[in-house]
Image (cartoon, rainbow, N blue to C red):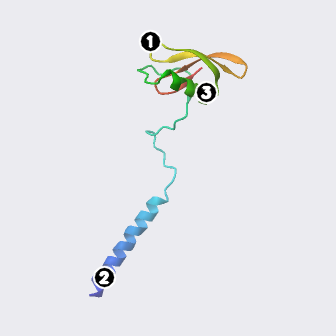
């Protein structure tokens, strides 16, 4: 009679140990998950852009640009316009992935 109870307790302890070991894993890298922040790239990714003009403004502001103006979506789906970075006026863009292009 003691043997089945002991086996059950040992089995439960092993399961609990495995669950605890899994819960302590942190920082696993999953490339499919993107953070919401804008990334700077040298050339935009072409594709159908679902960002609204207001969202493109927001991405540019998050990337540190101010006084964003003249945003227009080009034939490649990239929002393009002008903005200021410090005192410099620069051409900017936001591609369909949300990447900021300067």
Q: Residue at x 70, y 17 (%)?
A: 88
As drawn, the label of residue 75 is 1
Q: Of discs 3 and 2, which sits in the foreground?
A: 3
Q: Earlier in the sequence, mark 3 or mark 1?
A: 3
Q: Which residue is mark 3?
A: 61
Helix, strand or loop at label 1? It is loop
Residue 5: image tag: 2
Q: Is residue 77 above or below residue 30?
A: above
Whether residue 28 is visible to the viewer of this picture, yes or no, is yes
Q: Is residue 23 above or below residue 82?
A: below
CA separation, marks 3 and 2? 63 Å
Mark 3: which secondary structure?
A: helix
Residue 16: horizontal and vertical position, in percent?
40, 68
Residue 24 drawn at (x, y percent): 49, 59
Q: Residue at x 38, y 70 (%)?
A: 14
Instruction: Specify few, some or many for label 3: CA neighbours under 10 Å numbering under 14, 14-19, or 20 or more.
Output: some
């Amino acid at each position: 009679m003691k043997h089945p109870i002991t086996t059950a307790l040992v089995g439960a302890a092993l399961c609990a140990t495995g669950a605890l070991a899994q819960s302590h894993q942190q920082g696993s890298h999953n490339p499919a998950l993107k953070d919401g922040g804008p990334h700077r790239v040298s050339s935009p990714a072409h594709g159908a852009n679902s960002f609204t003009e207001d969202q493109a403004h927001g991405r540019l502001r998050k990337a540190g640009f101010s006084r964003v103006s003249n945003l227009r979506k080009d034939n490649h789906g990239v929002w393009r316009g002008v903005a200021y970075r410090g005192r410099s006026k620069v051409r900017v863009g936001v591609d369909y992935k949300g990447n900021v292009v300067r």
